[in-house]
Amino acid sequence: MKIFTTEQLREIDRATIEADGITALQLIERMAEGVTAEVIGMLHANMRIAIFAGPGNNGADALAVARLLVAQGYRPTVFLFNRGGDRLSAECAECKRKLLEMGADVDFTEVTGLFNLPPLSRHDLVVDGLFGSGLREGLTGGFREMVKYINDSGATIVSIDVPSGLFGDWNPKSVHRNMIHATVTLSAQFPRLAFMMADNASIVGRWKTIDIGLNPSVIRRTSAPFYLVEHSDVSRILKPRQPFCSKADFGSLMLVAGSYGMMGAAVMAARGALRAGAGKVTVYSPRCGFDVMQSAVPEAMFQAANSDIFISDIRPQHEYSTVALGPGIGSRDETVSALENFLKRHEQPVVLDADALNCIARQQNLMHMVPVLSVLTPHAAEFDRMFGPQPCAEARLVKAIEVSRYHNVLIVLKGRYTTVIRPDGRLYFNSSGNAAMATPGSGDVLTGVIAALMAQGYKPEVAALAGVYIHGLAGDIAAEAEGQYGVTAGDIAANIGRAIKSLL
């Protein structure tokens, strides 16, 4: 699914109106119908409804919702904020007129100056239509105080478009206490970039999209800088296997992984790689890993490094389709030196995870040796160790875009919406996965999956995108069986094959 910028969505709205011969009011009505259905579905017995509408088209949406609720027998309390009495957009003014035509059943107040806030409690439902994505600056003054009052009430809050005070795209200097903290955010047709940021999770709450019938041709021809990767996207990527095939057709992978006390990371990476279909997997590890690997993953081959408990050299005996480095290798001086010597000799894209990234953090010049289009898979702490502490998730993503472009590498920034950052600046947010995957070894499985896809001939950018989704989908399958507390990395690895099967 494409994720458009706020300006692009405005243009898509305008182009839809022109191409389909409709009006802006008709788009507002479509949005209001969807929002009204969601609101009614959330109501409990004796729940009061308070609707806060601003002077723009976000307020028009809210007023249209109020009218539809009244038509279905509900009696919301409606506040329209129109400071000075002459600030309404044409659409908002028309929605106000239609609402007032409902007569005595409408509890309506138009606020043009000072007013007393209505009593609100946790038993109420608030529809937030104050300010949408057209907001140009943060909330101040009376609006800031009103937002605080609504948040402190404990009411269920449904925000239309975006929570008031939040910008739809980037929010580099926004103050969260000056924003509505929504229970649910209902966005028109597409999610917003801001929804993908961990920083905004408490602001956005759960989010859903409302299909308002934007013109499909206009959507297709509008190029988006951001994407939400979904099931159908990955289904189109994966190639079914042909009847006359052998393991030689699916590549060879070397995993440089493990050290004394950390062989579990190598096991998880190898299991992930094998379940993701790599033709041959060789684990390159210190001698102490031999018994562990042969017992835990007998399907994988083993090559011993020239040391007993840690990796001090990386000298493959064969040419491999892909090499992945990092899970559990530690960051001793000798291991950093081994990684440096390997990167100096190796020219093909590799996958770098975990301790390989920590080695780079210790010796920054190694970044300049990483082959073009390699895949780096840091979580937040690993990223910050490599590229400096970041104040928030959004700042980290901005820095990752810069690093990806400068070094011409792919960065898989792990999190709720794990993001694949490409050197051309495009961002791919992953939609699969769940909180159960916050468990030791989960990232090692992901390393194996991405590397296995690369070994099978998928381009690094495709392998990263598909691998992240498959990994998350396996986590979803595992969580259905084990619950959010009970999933282990082994469960995720065990379900990689089922995830791929569902995609094919």
Image (cartoon, grey):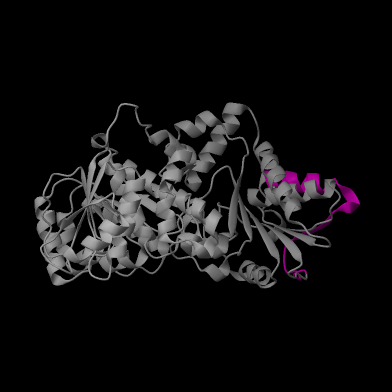
Q: How many marks?
A: 0
Q: Is residue 409 above or below residue 52?
A: above
Q: Which residues are magenta?
A: 91-118
Whole-percent x, y for residue 153 in the image: 70, 71
Residue 382 relative to residue 196: left or right: left
* Observer-nearest of 337 and 244: 244
| 139 displayed left or right of 313 | right
Position in image of residue 109 (x %, y %): 79, 59
Is 331 above or below relative to 428? below
Looking at the image, residue 197 sits to the left or right of residue 78; the answer is left
Can residue 422 be spotted in the picture? no
* Residue ID at (17%, 68%): 310
Q: Position of residue 82 (x, y in %)?
A: 70, 57
Q: Is residue 107 magenta?
A: yes
- Location of residue 411 in the rendering, given as x and y in whole percent from the top left corner: 31, 53
Q: Is residue 4 visible?
A: yes
Q: Quadrant of the C terminus?
A: top left
Q: Quadrant of residue 321?
A: top left
Q: Residue at x 18, y 54 (%)?
A: 370
Q: Nearer the viewer, residue 446 or 366?
A: 446
Is 183 part of what is drawn in magenta?
no
Q: Residue lying farthest right?
A: 104
Q: Please state if 312 lies on the left or on the right of 254 as rendered.
A: left
Residue nearer the viewer, 287 or 390? 287
Residue at image position (11%, 49%) is: 317
